[in-house]
Amino acid sequence: MNDLDDSAFDTLFREACQKCFGFPLKDQLTETESKLLSGKIFDQTGLVIGPKSIKNYSSFIVRNGKEENPSVATMDTLARYVLNAPYTDEIERKNKESHYPYWFQYKSQFHTSLKKPVKKRFLPAILLLLGIIIFIGLTFIVFQSKQGKFKEFSEDFNSVSEDSLLNKGWFVQAEDNEYWNRRVEQPGHLTLFTLKGDNWPDSLNKPNIKNLLLRNISPGCFITEVHLSDFMPKQNWQQAGILLLEDTSFTGKSLRLSLLYNDFYGGFPKSKEIIGQAIISKGKEFSKPEEIAHQLIFKIDSTNEELVRQNLQHFALRIEKHGTKFRLLYANGSMANAAFKEILSMDIDMNIKFIGLFALKGFVDSADNIPAAFDFFSYTPEKCK
């Protein structure tokens, strides 16, 4: 690239970071931030820029690191993200827009901005008014397109390579390399492990869920469902399920629905249970979460453990959101077509932006890191009444 193109790309990349994170780029992006920006770009444009490339670009721009030479296609993808271009994919762009119009549009605007601008007082008032009307109209169109860009999505986890997950809109947070690399252990599944962590803090630990798999969703109404195969927790607080979040830093509100093991009763005689649990965290201003559902599914003893295992061969969780009304359900059995049963229905005020799949054991060291094999995920947005 020549010097002007370098300057245009520098400004374009900074604008993309500002749009994604809400603050100016000041230092090299972390691995998690790079994956988040990559996911946001894919969600809006339908095109992929790998997180490693994004991290390298940020190092080049902020730290004057190893020189990078992004392709015209990459710069066009960034420009499409910044300019709110219509959703597309690589095949459609190759067929219809192989001349990369958005990069050249952005570069032209950037070069023009370097010239001395015409003073606004010489513009006729009618042109200013017309410009305002056009801007408002375009803003409305973009807003409408964003509202409709979240479509029905399902995932059978037949491929869980990083590129495949990224291309489908997933991104992983708090990656633990050892166990994340084992996500392929059961064919046709995404295997997560009940690692130490939780999405709400205690006196010694900050909220953190390792290998949390996330995707953006519409803040409106929806139905989401996840299926697990042969997941039978046996120690406190081994669990796996669905996590709804207002933000990925755990500072906002969240709702967690999971299948877990429990035998803790504050010193009273123990009873081993498999339960469906729903937990709400109201954000960083509240120190304690609220358990809104504690649904007994099985009591375990020495005579029925194998029977319980058979009935957990297929386990499913579903969350339905209609306005502020949330409906939580579960299904289990030795057959995959077991009917759903309602756990809870209640009003919850949340502005959900992310949905995650997780496995964890809380902030304890005594429980084992057992696998939780996710077989299916679906997300269906609906119009709110």
Image: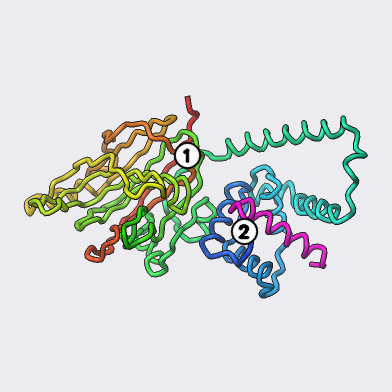
- Tell me the colour scheme of the image: rainbow
Residue at 45% x, 44% y is 154
Amino acid type of the residue that numbered disc 2 sits on in the rendered structure: Ile
Instruction: Please state the horizontal and vertical placement of residue 178, each as a whole percent of the image.
Output: 38, 69
The quadrant in which residue 210 appears is: bottom left
Assign the N terminus to one quadrant of the image. Answer: bottom right
Residue 287: image location, x then y, percent: 34, 50
Q: Which residues are magenta?
A: 1-24
Give amino acid for label 1: Asn
- The residue at the point 42 percent across, 30 percent down is 322
Question: Earlier along the polypeptide chain: callout 2 or callout 1?
Answer: 2
Which mark is drawn over residue 49? Answer: 2
Label the magenta part by its dominant secondary structure: helix
Q: Is residue 379 above or below residue 23?
A: above
Total numbered labels placed on residues in the image: 2
Q: Secondary structure at mark 2?
A: loop
- Labels 2 and 1 touching (C-beta < 8 A): no
**Tag 1, which secondary structure?**
loop
User: For the residue carrying disc 2, how many other residues have a C-alpha within 10 Å: few (<14), some (14-19), or many (20+)?
Assistant: many
Q: Is 105 left, or right, of 44 in this rendering?
A: right
Which residue reaches farthest bottom?
Answer: 66
Q: Say which residue label 1 marks.
A: 351
Q: Nearer the viewer, residue 361 or 340?
A: 361
* Real-space CA distance between mark 2 and mark 1, rounded to the nearest whole angstrom: 28 Å
Does the magenta portion include 13? yes
